């Protein structure tokens, strides 16, 4: 079976116990092994009470236990610390691994906290943040939030329902009230992005599921065309070196930063989380360069200047 650990779990057992982004490395398949654990639905629980996405969810027992522990600890440890930063720091040092969502032949919920790419890192801490804010602290609660974040209209369907481009992710999560897009028509938002996405439909050979299911290409292409031509204010990378005391201070600790790209057919190349240090902006992210989750020692301005295809950033805040 092409999965690490597949659990079929009832709601009563749960308390026991991520784009077409250049950073995700979509051509690499996630590592697999032959270890399979199947837990039957509890005798006292009706199968009808098990959420549809939990019936085929893939995760390790270590990860489900970690989710519950993180949420329990946050209740007493976090204090007034920004939730996104609090949970983000818990994953510092976790290895960067691309394409962990590409396991299996059909779309299913994958929870993997021990291997993260830029997208799954942000999704993981966003889901934990939402659970903590709502004081919902079971593993099932976490999975429910992850589905809302990761899939179009908060509903998991086939591969085409996943929010592969960050423009889709941002627009859908804003529509559901999960995040708010931070922007203005004045400094530091002095540029406008006109989206033109078609990378997935033009390069289906790079995507495991599109190779296996060519019928998905048409639907992906329709979604791409529906988004292309839309415009958004953004902060050009020349402006991200300003100090917190300037208009750049509109960015807060824990905000999600989406790095825009000039690469043809794509909208973003990387995402991470804003961290202010000594009045200068830094980036917390699952870094392909460092091969792990880090707070970059370079300022965000220094980081962006050496990324030749990056043009600037859009900013989102978890609500």
Image: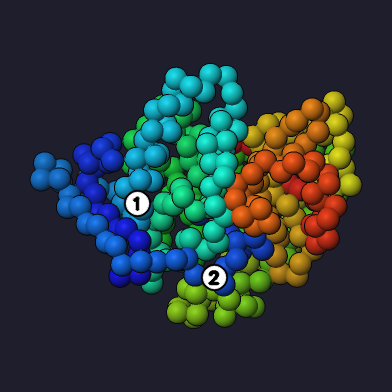
Return the x and y of residue 138 as percentages of the image width and height.
34, 35
Instruction: Kindly identify the residue that appears in the image at 36 percent across and 53 percent down.
Output: 59
> To which residue does mark 1 refer?
60
Return the x and y of residue 3 as percentages of the image width and height.
35, 64
Return the x and y of residue 29 as percentages of the image width and height.
49, 70
Is 176 positioned to the left or the right of 193 in the image?
A: left
Which sits in the foreground, 86 or 141?
86
Name which quarter of the figure residue 227 lies in: bottom right
Instruction: Kindly identify the residue that appears in the image at 48 percent across and 40 percent down.
Output: 127
- Quick check: 42 above or below 133? below
Name which quarter of the figure residue 88 lies in: top right
> To which residue does mark 2 refer?
28
Circle 1 sits in a helix, a strand or a loop, which is it? loop
- Quick check: 14 above or below 72? below
The tag earlier along the polypeptide, 2 or 1, is 2
The answer to whether residue 274 is seen in the rendering is yes
Is 64 positioned to the left or the right of 77 in the image?
A: left
Which sits in the foreground, 260 or 15?
15
Return the x and y of residue 158 as percentages of the image width and height.
42, 65
In the rendered image, which quarter contains the N terminus?
Answer: bottom left
In the rendered image, which quarter contains the C terminus?
Answer: top right
Which sits in the foreground, 70 or 133?
70
Instruction: Kindly identify the residue that appears in the image at 73 percent across and 52 percent down.
Output: 259
- Quick check: 268 above or below 138? below
């Amino acid at each position: 079976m092409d999965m690490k650990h597949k659990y079929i779990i009832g709601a009563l057992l749960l308390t026991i116990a991520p784009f077409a982004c250049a950073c995700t490395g979509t051509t690499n398949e996630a590592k697999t092994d032959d270890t399979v654990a199947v837990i039957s639905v509890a005798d006292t629980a009706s199968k009808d009470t098990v959420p549809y996405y939990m019936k085929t969810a893939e995760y390790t027992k270590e990860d489900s236990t970690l989710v519950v522990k993180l949420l329990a600890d946050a209740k007493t440890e976090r204090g007034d610390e920004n939730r996104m930063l609090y949970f983000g720091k818990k994953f510092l040092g976790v290895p960067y691994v691309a394409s962990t969502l590409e396991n299996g032949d059909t779309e299913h919920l994958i929870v993997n906290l021990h291997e993260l790419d830029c997208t799954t890192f942000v999704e993981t801490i966003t889901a934990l943040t939402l659970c903590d804010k709502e004081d919902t602290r079971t593993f099932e609660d976490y999975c429910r939030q992850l589905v809302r974040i990761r899939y179009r209209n908060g509903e998991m369907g086939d591969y085409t329902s996943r929010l592969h481009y960050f423009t889709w992710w941002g627009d859908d999560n804003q529509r559901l009230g999960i995040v708010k897009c931070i922007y203005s028509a004045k400094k530091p938002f002095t540029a406008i992005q006109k989206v033109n996405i078609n990378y997935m439909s033009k390069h289906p050979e790079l995507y495991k599921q599109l190779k296996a299911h060519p019928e998905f290409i048409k639907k992906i292409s329709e979604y791409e065309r529906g988004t292309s031509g839309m415009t958004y204010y953004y902060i050009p990378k020349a402006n991200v070196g300003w100090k917190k005391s300037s208009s750049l201070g509109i960015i807060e600790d824990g905000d999600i930063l989406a790095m825009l790209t000039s690469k043809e057919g794509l909208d973003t190349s990387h995402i991470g989380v804003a961290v202010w240090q000594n009045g200068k902006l830094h980036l917390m992210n699952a870094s392909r360069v460092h091969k792990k989750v880090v707070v970059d020692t370079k300022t965000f301005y220094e980081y962006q200047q050496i990324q030749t295809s990056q043009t600037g950033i859009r900013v989102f805040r978890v609500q």
